[in-house]
Amino acid sequence: MAEGSAVARITGVHATSALGRGAGAQLAGVLAGEPAFGPVTRFDTTARRVDRAATLTDVGPLADELAAAVDAACADAGLTAADRTAAALLLAVHGGPDAGPLAAGLARRTGIDGPRRVYTTACVSASSAVADAAALIRRGDADRVVVAAGYLVEPDQYALFDAGRALATDGAVRPFSAGRAGLLLGDGVAAVVLESTTVARRPLADLLGWGRAGDAFHACRPDPEGRGLARAVEAALHRAGLPADAVGYVNANATGTGFSDASEANALRRALGAAVDRVPVSSTKAVHGHALEASGLLELVVTVLAVRHGKLPVNAGFLGPDEACPLDVVLDAPRPAATPYALSLNAAFGGANTALLVGAA
C-alpha cells in the first residue's frame, strides 16, 4: 500500500435504477437476471431507430434523486449530522454549466460541508471518483468521503447513441454473447460512503485497490488487445497486494457491443493470465442498462452486495458463446462466490479505463 496504511472502507450504500429503489432491490434484480428494459415513455422516440431503455416510472428530478440517495447512504453508514459536516463530496454527473451548481446544491441539502469535486469524464466518472476517494483516505487526507452519481435517461444522450447506431435494435443487452447487437441506456442514481478504519462503524466492504489507464488508440473504439484496461486491473491488484487468482468475480464493463466486449475479454486474459479461466464474469448492464456517468457507482454497489451475500449475478441475454470472448460467463443461475474479492470494471470513449477491487468485510 504505497500511499499509506489506511484502508478505505465502504460503510453505506444506496442505489436506484429501473430494478427499484434501494440496495436490496438492486441485488434482487441482478440475481433474478430479469432485464428491466421497456418502451421509453419519458420523451418522444418516434424518430429513433430504437425505443427501449431501463427507466423508472416514478422518478423525480435528478437533484432530488441524488439528495435522497446521499441521505440514505449516510443513514446506512450511521453518520451523524456532525459526521456529514466534515465529509468530502465527490459527484459524478453529465458535464455542462449545471454540474457545479448541482454539486453545491447537493452539499447544502445533505449537510456535507467538506471539499467538493465534480467528475464529468463520461462512463468512468463515478469509478474515477471512487478511486480518488480511496486515495484521499489511504493518504490520510480525509477520514470520510461521500461519492454520489446520477444519470436519468434523457433525449439528448439517447439521440446521440441512437444516431451512432450503438443501441441494441433487438431490445436486449447481451454481454459477451454471440449475436449481441449493442447497448441500452438505463437510469442510475447511487451514493456510497467511504471511511477510514479509524472512524468506520458499519463496514460492508473494503476498497482494496484501484487502477486507471488510457488506451490512446481511438476516440470511440477501445484497443482491441485491451492493453489499457489490463493495466488498470494490474494496478488495482498491485495496490491491493493480491494475486490474480484471488479474484472471485468480475462485474465487467461489457456493454453488449462487439468491439468493446471482445477488447475487455482480451484485457482480462492479459491481466489475469491463466487464472482468467477460473474467474466468473458477468455484466449487470444486461439487466439495469448503461447509466453512463453513474454506471461505475451503481455497478460498485451491486458488486459489493453480491460478494457480501456470496451470490454472483447472471449475465442476462446470453444467446451462445463468442470465440472472441473466451470467459467463464455466469449463465442460467447465480453462482456461489468462491472468494470475497471482486473487480468492477468501467471504460469510456476516449480510451479511459478504470478497475475497482473490493473485498467483502
Image (cartoon, rainbow, N blue to C red):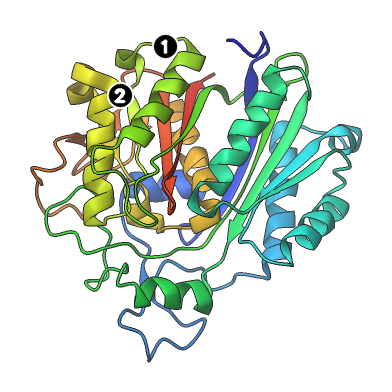
Residue 244 at x, y percent in the picture: 32, 16
| Residue corresponding to mark 2 | 271
Q: Nearer the viewer, residue 57 or 300?
A: 300
Farthest residue, direction bottom: 46
Q: Report whether 50 appears left or right of 62.
A: left
Q: Residues under labels 2 and 1: Cα distance?
A: 13 Å
Q: Which mark is residue 159?
A: none
Q: What secondary structure is found at the residue carrying circle 2? A: helix
Question: Relative to residue 312, is residue 70 drawn left or right?
Answer: right
Q: Residues within 10 Å of mark 1 (few under 14, many from 20)?
A: some
Residue tagged by mark 1?
242
User: From the viewer's perspective, is residue 354 above or below residue 153?
Assistant: above
Which amino acid, mark 1? Answer: Leu
* Residue visible at 89% across and 38% down in the picture: 85
Residue at coordinates 29% horizontally, 37% vertically from top-left? 226
Observer-nearest of 169 and 22: 169
Q: Report the amino acid beneath label 2.
A: Ala
Q: Nearer the viewer, residue 173 or 76?
A: 173
Q: Is residue 217 visible?
A: yes
Where does residue 51 sit, x and y in percent of width and height?
Answer: 35, 80
- What crowding class fits label 2: few (fewer than 14 Cα within 10 Å), some (14-19), or many (20 or more)? many
> Taking 231 as reference, is 73 above or below it?
below
Confirm whether residue 22 shows in the render: no
Q: Residue at x 70, y 15 (%)?
A: 197
Question: Which quarter shows the N terminus?
Answer: top right
- Residue 139 or 30: which is nearer the viewer? 139
- Could you tell me which secondary element the residue under label 1 belongs to? loop
